[in-house]
Amino acid sequence: MPQAAPDLSNLLRQDIRFLGKALGEVIRDSEGKATFTLIEALRRAAVGFRREHDPRQARILEQDIPTLSDTQARTVARAFAYFLHLSNIAEDRDQNRRRLEHNPEQLPGSLQHAIQTLMDEGLSARKIRRYLQEACVMPVLTAHPTEVQRQSTLAVHMAIAAELHSLDHDANESQTARIQEKLTGLISLLWQTRMLREHRLTVLDEIDNALAYYGSTFLPTIPQLYSDLDRLLDKPRKNLLDQKTRPLPAFLRMGSWIGGDRDGNPNVGPDTVEQAVMRQATCVLRHYLEQIRLLGTEISVSDGLSRISKDLAALSARSQDPSPHRVDEPYRRSFIHVYARMAATAQTLLGRELADRPTYPAEPYAAPQDFAADLQVIADSLADHKGGAIAGLRLNALIQAVEVFGFHLATLDLRQSSDVHERVLDELFRVAGTEFNGELVSYRNLSEQERITLLRSELQHHRPLVSPWYHYSEETEKELAILRKAADCRRRFGARAIEQTIVSHTETLSDLLEVLVLQQETGLIVPGSSHPDQQGLMVVPLFETIPDLERGPSIMQEWLDMPEIRQRVRHAQDSVQEVMLGYSDSNKDGGYLTSNWTLYRAEREFAQVFARRKVRLRLFHGRGGSVGRGGGSSFDAILAQPPGTVNGQIRLTEQGEMIQGRYKDADVGRWHLELFVAATLEASLGNRHHNQPSDDEQLAAYGQAMAWMSEQAHHSYRQLVYGTEHFDQYFFQSTPIQEIAGLNIGSRPSSRKPNQRIEDLRAIPWSFSWAQCRLPIPGWYGMGTALSRYLEYGVPDDGLTRQQRLEQLQNMAANWPFFRTLLSNMEQVLAKTDLDIGAKYAGLVKDEALRDHVFKQIRHEFHLTVEMFRQVTGHDLLAHDQALRDALAERFAYIDPLNHLQVELLRRHRAQSDKARKAIRNGVNKQHVIHLTINGIAAGLRNSG
């Protein structure tokens, strides 16, 4: 009889139960029975409350946690935090397991499903291949400060995941016992490993942390993804032995901000730019050397048994391999020569030896294409002589990797605020004695039109504006040095090493022109040269606030209508212009609904502006992990983009804890990359809504209502955050924002200015803080007010009854991807909101009247939003996803004690004098324990940053 399919939810429970039991045993053995019993009592109370909704269990937490000593609090925090770490590992394994249970053709988000869908709609494989030649799909890793895990703990996580992957609960007792013993040892190692960093990360630390994901995930999985896509687009192969392959164009590549993002980070400079590029190159060149070494070991084909091509014979003849044992092994001799050339390449580019085996002097490769050409000679010779399948074992993946990663690994972006560029140019013009309209220029006092005229004139001049003999201000010298270093890195490692420079706070056209002038002054743009690599970096505006997003399309229209820019875009940028959208700041500025609606309208207008000028639009989505920062499903988000805004061109930030959540496990990382590619293909080439109204029709039907609701939501949100007197005091006292600023989780300060104004606080710690206290208002506040007011009053003179307006909203939720995704993402945030725990944090506010006034508004808006969600969708929160609902309930049982503990510790810490805090030497530092709770809560919520 066939065996019944395993109950996947039961397998997950078994994994979590085993890991939890092992952790408990480690704690009991390490900390003693009394400590174990204490932790177990708190765990049982929390689980009992979540499962049985018994308020008596909640009171146990409220009564027992304040009685803990600081030492006990530290152990409890570590225990619950590490359990959540282990649960995440088990859930990642379960996600992989569930995916493998599905037929790939029927699994939305898989490459196979996407390609089959497109082919069912009439697209040929040839057309899809042709489309990929001009496509750009790029996840961009950033170092924003919400990643609270150390690399040391992540390494143990990966080892635990690897052992768990081989654990079969139905295996024989001996096998299972052996694996369980290893897992217990690893969990013991985890328990005895310091969870938090003792010192703040430097930029170089952040670079190295990101590079760790390349060895484990990106370098092995991205070439495999290309191979799978190539196979899906290929004709059925009759004979793998003589199958000749060529790499697919590098449409999926990696990007990075780490080391080049200097907006608000004084620790980024010319040295970090150079180190970012050098360390990335070191990573990829080491990978190439190791792969060549393995190929030389593995491909032992003898020319006495198989013929070889003339090109392969010539390559083998250039080898200086002295071994008589390899005289008849031309492939091995060829790889020895390729290894020598790659070792010389590393020495030339990096100024250091990377080869870990003896070699001989050889000519370095001038470019990645030369390296790939040698590899292709070997692959073609194999394919021509019944060895195509041999090339498929490792060599083809290496050839594809060279196409994707080059000698640079990932494209580094530069980013700086427009305010800095303005100050630098003001000084340059002043020192140079530049005249405008017969007077010496005071650039900062010029009107916008005067600035444009001056900057355009400057771009026509080939004489230098910067004097080599003058000592400029520290800020100006640093900015010029960074751009000069970028030019040097491009010359050494290729133009793909650094391609974009992003202008934060773009508010005017001159903000973009300023960057072109600075590039011309630092060697990035070589006047008079027509070589594409000497045309400098693409200038990318970042529109962040609501007003900036509203002005964005008109700014880009002016930009593209300038003849010199039009020529630059056509010849130097391949008719592509990128625009970056800021989700975080627009949300902090205007709230969830207004931010998303403004972004949606701006994207549509950008698409129209670019289409009329026959320029391809590439949107760069600055999304975070939390929904308030554009988080949620990347697959759904891409598919919900307005028509004409993807078109095979998309970049998207991967930030904070989302990087380790998505990419520390190779299988999970592969799936996220696959989702990214599949969604881009379907959004660009698919006809997903052929039986539904077009986006224009939906906007005509619903746009007026959305605009009205956006105004209501915007007013409601702004009234709370910026209109409530002393709201900043409420925020800083009721959330762990000040303690988060003390975490050693990033090189970048959490605030732009040293004060406690909400306006100056960065959007990332803003969202992170609200998530910690379980009141993630950036993901829903204002929605309830907007929906309820629309139902009651509607757009003036719309002539609709309340019931008709409700039916309209229900139609929007069912048929309009934008609105459906808006509600779906909000639903997940509402499900993670906990007013009872939020009230505990509100209790930290000293001013009772302020506390009651603000929390009353939050509580009212939450209940209103949940009720409006039910009316519009027709169901309760997560009613259609019982598995997620159950998983969250289980997860909350382990997050709740950490929240109670964090509140108690915040109260103790803030009551302690600065003198008493500094006096702590051998005792328990309360702030350190608070940081442990922050770590655990972030791990439990997974997408809080």
Image (tube, helix red, strand yellow):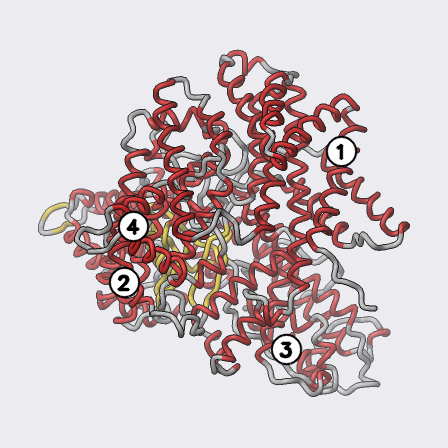
Other residues around mark 3 within 10 Å, as few (<14) / some (14–19) / many (≥20) = many
Residue denoted by label 3:
376
Q: How many marks?
A: 4
Residue 701: give its label.
2
Vertically, is 750 above or below 394?
Answer: above
Q: Position of residue 387 (x, y in %)?
A: 74, 82
Residue denoted by label 1:
24
Vertically, is 921 above or below 335?
Answer: above
In the image, 628 versus 751, the foreground residue is 628
Residue drawn 64% across and 55% down?
95
Q: Mark 1 and 3 residues: CB-CB less than 8 Å, in contact?
A: no
Q: Position of residue 176 (x, y in %)?
A: 85, 50
Q: Earlier in the sequence, mark 3 or mark 2?
A: 3
- Amino acid on which disc 3 is placed: Gln
Q: Earlier in the sequence, mark 1 or mark 3?
A: 1
Label 2's element? helix
- Amino acid on which disc 1 is placed: Gly
Marks 2 and 4 sit apart, C-alpha to C-alpha, by 32 Å
Marks 3 and 2 sit apart, C-alpha to C-alpha, by 56 Å
Label 1's element? helix
Nearest to the eye among marks 1 and 3: give it: 1
Residue denoted by label 4:
506
Give the quadrant of the N terminus: bottom right
- Amino acid on which disc 4 is placed: Thr
Q: Position of residue 350 (x, y in %)?
A: 58, 55
Marks 4 and 1 sit apart, C-alpha to C-alpha, by 53 Å
Q: Mark 2 and 4 residues: CB-CB less than 8 Å, in contact?
A: no
